[in-house]
Image (cartoon, rainbow, N blue to C red):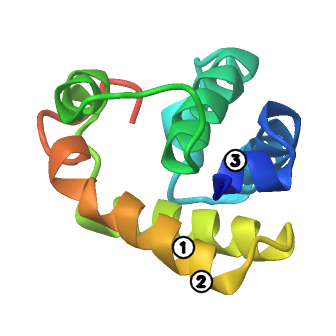
Amino acid sequence: MKTSLFERIGGFAKVRLIISDFYDRILDSEMLRSYFENIDIRRMIDHQTKFVSALMGGPVSYSNEQLGRAHHHLGITPDEYAEMGEIFRETLEDHDIPLVEVDRLHAHILALQEHVIGGAPAETK
């Protein structure tokens, strides 16, 4: 029986490590850090760990509508979304995720852009 990437890399513990590193990088990004100034980053890491676990075949799921409701009001631009996608890709590569899986996950993230960007700019920006 074929196992998911989520299972092959070690489940939630490994995904959480990747996502913690990802947010360290996001907070270093001049373009993106302002989105997280008043956010509980530990809570965000927990949430994103579940989301990325789902992308890797783990036991969680999210709908496009949920993604839209959670992000649309932030006014994320295409350039900001691309920056986040590139940081995500680099983080996966640095954690030795197989390149074919990095490409698949990155493409999946990019395909979600229409559900995430747009709306009115956030007041904290």
Q: Along the line of sight, which residue is nearer the eye, 119 or 125?
A: 119
Say what amino acid the circle numbered 2 marks. Answer: Val
Where's residue 71, x and y in %?
29, 31
Looking at the image, residue 65 sits to the left or right of residue 105; the answer is left
Q: Which of marks 1 and 2 is in front?
A: 2
Locate residue 104 relative to residue 71 in the image: left or right: right
Can you say whether 125 is above or below 111 in the image?
A: above
Q: Which residue lies furthest to the front in this view?
A: 1
Q: Image quadrant of residue 115?
A: top left
Q: Which of the image's four quarters has the N terminus?
A: bottom right
Q: Please tell me whether mark 1 sits on a helix, a strand or a loop.
A: helix
Q: Is residue 5 above or below residue 123?
A: below
Can you say whether 125 is above or below 70 in the image?
Answer: below
- The residue type indicated by label 3 comes to Phe
Residue at position x 78%, y 32% from top? 12
Q: Name the residue under label 2.
A: 100
Label 3 belongs to which residue?
A: 6
Tag 1: Cα neighbours inside 10 Å, few (<14), some, or many (≥20)? some
Q: Label 1: which residue?
A: 86
Q: Can you say whether 91 is above or below 124 in the image?
A: below
The secondary structure type at the circle numbered 2 is helix
**Separation (CA) of disc 1 from disc 3:** 21 Å
Separation of marks 3 and 2 at Cα, in angstroms:
14 Å
Amino acid at circle 1:
Glu
User: From the viewer's perspective, is the residue at label 1 or at label 3 nearer?
Assistant: 3
Q: Can residue 24 be seen in this view?
A: no
Q: At 59% from the left edge and 45% from the top edge, which residue is drawn?
A: 33
Q: Circle 3 sits in a helix, a strand or a loop, which is it?
A: helix
